[in-house]
Amino acid sequence: MADYFTHFSCLLDVGTPERAAAAMAMFQRCRVEDEEADEPQYRGFDLSPQDEGLSGQLWIRDDDGGDPDGVVVFVLRLAHDLDLRGLWGFDFAHTTSRPILGSFGGGATVIDLTARKVVGFVGTQTWLAQALNGEDPDA
């Protein structure tokens, strides 16, 4: 039997060490909310300050669950609470512990922090299937 994984590792710059500390506090509150929720939202990733908390950068990475959707929900909430601006995105990889057909892939998500919405997503398996079917996967 194979083990399946989703991996990602990225930085989000929230501007200042103080804002990074506020983001960390919000992350802890979100985790408490998840413990009480029927459908947890903020799962599948870990968060920590970069540079020993001396910068405004946060390191976001997969945990045992590796859920990019949890990252998206958290970053959208963070954008609202901290009034983040601009575009931000990350990519991820789907892997498995042994070669199995159809078990590898990945994707990327782009978020407009100002508008508080996802503005782009691509999944490699869908993109590849469309390209092989003669469709324009970028349309």
Image (spheres, rainbow, N blue to C red):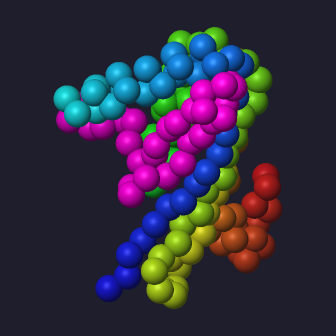
| 42 falls in the magenta region | yes
How far across and how far down the image is residue 50, in percent? 63, 36
Relative to 33, residue 99 above or below: below
Query: Image check: 73 left or right of 50?
Result: left
Q: Can residue 21 be seen?
A: yes
Q: Quadrant of residue 60?
A: top right
> x and y percent of residue 83 in the render?
63, 12
Q: Quadrant of residue 87?
A: top right
Above or below for 8 versus 5: above
Span of residues in magenta: 37-65
Nearest the eye: 116 or 56: 56
Residue 13 spot, x, y in % from top left: 70, 28
Question: How many labels sit on residues?
Answer: 0
Q: Residue at x 52, y 36 (%)?
A: 48
Front residue (pair 26, 136)? 26
Q: Is residue 19 above or below residue 134?
A: above
Location of residue 53 with respect to 8 vertically, above or below: above
Could you tell whether 13 is left or right of 98 in the image?
right
- Residue 97 on image: x %, y %: 46, 80
Say left or right for 29 vs 94. left
Q: Quadrant of the N terminus?
A: bottom left
Res 12 quadrant in image: top right
Residue sitting at x 48%, y 76%: 96
Answer whether residue 54 is magenta in the image: yes
Say which residue appears at 37% left-offset and 26% top-offset.
28
Does the image show residue 117? no
**Relative depth, front residue between 139 and 26:** 26
